[in-house]
Amino acid sequence: MKRRDQFMTVARSGGTERHPSERVGDFKEYKTALTEAEASQQASRCMDCGTPFCHVGEVFDQVKIGCPVYNLIPEWNLLVEEGRFQEALDRLLETNNFPEFTGRVCPAPCEGSCTLSIHEPAVAIKDIERTIIDIGFEKGWVVPRIPAIRSTRSIAIVGSGPAGLAAADQLNQAGHQVTVYEREDRIGGLLTYGIPAMKLDKEVVQRRVDLLEAEGIHFRTNVTIGADITLETLEAEYDAVILCVGATEPRKLTDAPTRGVGYAMDYLTGVTRHVLSQEPLSADHDAKDKDILVIGGGDTGADCVATALRQRCRSVVQFGKHEQPGTTRATGNMWPDTPSLYSIDYGYAEALQQFGRDPREYLIAIKRFTTSESGQVTGVWTIQTTKTKNESGTVIFEEIEGSDRYFPVDQVWIAIGFSGVEENVLEHLAVASERGKIKTTRYATNRPGVFAAGDARRGQSLIVWAIREGREVAEAVGQYLKAMQQTG
């Protein structure tokens, strides 16, 4: 009988990370995939799980469980354990259009719902997933799948992020004619310009785009909806239109100086554009020898920290209004919910190496900015706070008297999230909306034949949710096209 005690005897291990002092000198990926042998060993930790929750992919009230695209994790882990990587790849691609993206940048809610994670480190699901797809490309198993039969139906997709690309892939494989419109000069949306290259190499994105193009999808770049083409034109030329325009309207910070203060996504986009094309870098996007402040404690803020370090900033600090997470789950964050735990991600490890400290400041509030005579930001006065909840559950922040501190600052990047679809885009589209999001009924907007998916419909979310939205809107559009055919 095959041993099934690896979940007790094999320690968790992810891919190899380049040393922080080395990787901070370039924008190459900081982490490599597992070897086949390592992946097989890690997959063995998944076996003999009584009741897996990793693949559930549902939200119950506020509890988020498992993989939103329903990856068949135990099934492909078994195949990986047995060294059957090509079969594992086939199983993985049944549910996930782009595992090379999720295997690199998804925060892995599946691992938070891993049964083993109740008492031990979770199975390294994300690293195994990346290894499967990377091996698939290396060995030539991933090849263009050109539909044998084409329909006469055509679909326009506005936006080439993960939702738009997933919808395009599904509809193209169903045999329809698909054209994707993108306002930037490269396909990929935030995959290309919003996620730094050290997390997701842009050649990895382009490799997938080239594959989709070989399969028959048409891409049109440098086309802005509302400026270069109207929604009415798309409605007239195509049988259906899908809006995957994202939710990139940044939340504003009031009472901030106008000079030296900008938005995180502008910074990350500008730097990535420079890295990709070597076009001149704006002085506003150059952190060299500057004191950098990042406002916002999420992943986008962390990417700003890592980017500033690569530009040789003089110092960097990241402000968060909430408390530092614990190393174990809080009472209100029990398994199988996605865990909120303290961790040292790649950028923070690099800051520790360079400056000897974690750059994050918790429970901190800005009292006021200081500026030069010309209005350029020079620093911030802050105060520490306490966080409590009243009887109705409302969070209350109270200042701690005497905890004032001053931070010298040359550049501030605001990374406090997004409020919804960009206002000018939403105004042009003239579809029903609610709180900055496009309002839909089973992905259909109030305009006949016009659908929406991804962050534009759901609000700011994860790449894996965007892929699920893309797959589901494609199904909705397929049903719509079928109904059109039946009614003549």
Image: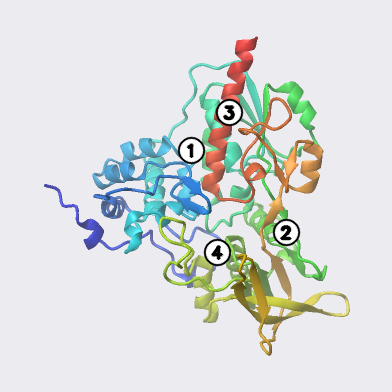
* Residue type at the position of mark 4: Asp
Under circle 3, the secondary element is: helix
The residue that disc 2 covers is 251
| Rendering coords of residue 92 (x, y %) | 39, 39
Nearest to N terminus: mark 2 or mark 1: 1
Q: Marks 2 and 4, how far apart in space?
A: 30 Å
The residue that disc 1 covers is 97
Nearest to N terminus: mark 4 or mark 1: 4
- The nearer-to-camera label among 4 and 1 is 1
* Residue type at the position of mark 1: Asn
Crowd rating for badge 4 (residues with CA inside 10 Å; few <14, some 14–19, many 20+): some
The residue that disc 4 covers is 26
Q: Residue at x 53, y 51 (%)?
A: 61
The residue that disc 3 covers is 476
* Residue type at the position of mark 3: Ala
Farthest front residue in view:
391
